[in-house]
Image (tube, helix red, strand yellow):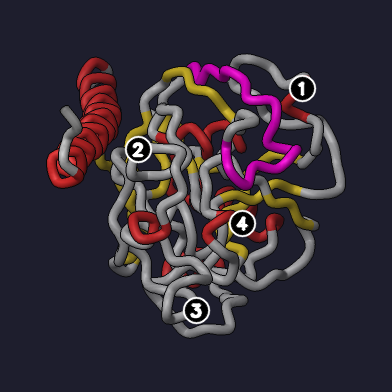
Amino acid sequence: MKKSPGILGFALCLASLAVIGAKAAAEEDCLAKAVAKQAESAQARNLSVEDSIDLGEGVILKLVYIPDGEFKMGSCDKVAFARSDERPEHKVKIARPFYMGKFEVTQDQFWQVCRSLPSMQDLPCGPADRVTWNEANEFCKIVSKMSGRRLRLPTEAEWEYACRCGSGAQFPYGTNQVEQRRLFEFAWFYNTEVRELHEAGLKRPNAWGLNDMLGNAWEWCSDWYAADYYASSPAEDPKGPESGKLRVARGGPWDYTFTSCRAAFREKANPELRLNSFGFRVVAEAR
């Protein structure tokens, strides 16, 4: 006896809903594990998940605790839009916990420390952009001296690990699947209606509480860039090639499409050039 189209369609609908439900549950489980790992690691070391540095005159640099751990860095062949310099996908160990800026360094923070501001768009609570790598590095040195706490730019591996929250997911909603609608909840990118820099923290943070890891502005990393570095990089705390001509930037800016707003996407630029949409985020050693 043949099944009627109505019954068959209903069965297919139920099967589809079951798959969607299982996928959503897996995503939630991945994010929940990341949150638990962060809290447990901080508690074990008697550290706070949230920290801050007073830059003076009421300007505060907020920090978030990032636990030590392992993750797979880069992209496998199955990831859509992956580029050759993201391969091979490889396991990396982050041996020590650290604190990372909750937001990209803002214009008011950069002005407070450096008493200069290269940004063209007036946005005090938005990313300080058009910042050269050398200027970002100097910012870290000045704050280290004034606070007594060592600040620096993140390594490329630290940045990607924090963006992924230690998981295998390229996107903050917990999967490797490109879903522009869901990505828009976390990131400003070219496909959105208003195409300009935005204030920090208007989008949802990732599971570890970091805002704007994807989109809004590129973020300088400490590493020199090499397209083939992943083929020979150390398995523990890689710091990039010993020398080079270009520095790594991560995260994708507001004026690129969603394809660059992935955890594994690598950009590179001359560290002396002043480029639109290039900002940075800091790392502080866990005390």
Q: Is residue 146 left or right of residue 18?
A: right
Residue occupied by mark 1? 231
Residue occupied by mark 3? 196
Q: Amino acid at mark 2?
A: Gly
For the residues marked 1 and 3, what is the alpha-carbon distance in whole angstroms?
A: 36 Å
Mark nearer the N terminus (1 vs 4): 4
Q: Amino acid at mark 4?
A: Ala
Please provide percent x and percent y for residue 120. 58, 83
Q: Residue at x 63, y 66 (%)?
A: 131
Q: Amino acid at mark 1?
A: Ala
Disc 1 secondary structure class:
helix
For the residues marked 1 and 4, what is the alpha-carbon distance in whole angstroms?
A: 28 Å
Chain part drawn in magenta: 79-95
Q: Nearer the viewer, mark 4 or mark 2?
A: 2
Disc 4 secondary structure class:
helix
Depth order, front residue of 68/16? 16
Mark nearer the N terminus (3 vs 2): 2
Residue occupied by mark 2? 174
Q: Nearer the viewer, mark 2 or mark 1?
A: 2
